[in-house]
Image: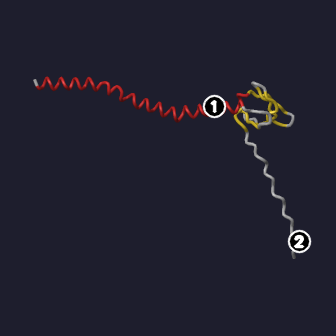
Amino acid sequence: MNLAYAMGQGGAAAAEGGGGLLATPLLPIILMLAIMWFLLIRPQQKKQKEHREMITNLKKGDMIITSGGLYGRITGVSEANLTVEIADKVRVKVSRGHVAGLAQTSKPDTPPAPKKADTDKK
């Protein structure tokens, strides 16, 4: 009788533990999905949102770079297209969606003025 009682207890314990065994493999999968969300998906969505805002805020006079690699200054703005001057008197129309970003507008470095030779000191 003790043997039947012991076996019966083991069977009940195994049946209760079955739910725990099912939940154990799900925990790592859920954890991996959460890590992927925070490391891959969320930063990409944030970058897309910033790019959309940049495209909507483009105005005449901004220096841009297109996804094709052309640098230019915006000379005309419409709802779907931009007119970009890429050289003197050379203008192209570019779809807003093909603007990769704002170009870095840096002032050209001016070389320092040459020093005057001191011929008075002898």
Q: Residue 64 appears in which quarter of the rendering?
A: top right
Say few, some or many: other residues with alpha carbon within 10 Å of mark 2 (under 14 / 14 to 19 / 20 or more).
few
> Where is mark 1, residue-wise?
49
Local secondary structure at mark 1: helix
User: Split into 4 quadrants, where in the image is the C terminus?
Assistant: bottom right
Labels in figure, total? 2
Residue placed furthest toward the left: 1
Whether 112 is drawn above or below 2: the answer is below
Estimate the x, y position of residue 117 in percent, counting from the top left: 86, 67
Tell me the residue at 77%/33% (across/down).
59
Q: What residue type is labelled 1?
A: Lys
Q: Is residue 60 left or right of residue 7?
A: right
The answer to whether residue 58 is left or right of residue 12 is right
At horizontal 16% and vertical 26% (from top left) the residue drawn is: 6
Q: Position of residue 109 (x, y in %)?
A: 78, 51
Q: Nearer the viewer, mark 2 or mark 1?
A: 1
Q: Which residue appears at 77% of the width and 36% of the height?
A: 62
Quadrant the N terminus occupies: top left
| Local secondary structure at mark 2 | loop
Q: Is residue 1 above or below residue 101?
A: above
The numbered disc on residue 119 is: 2
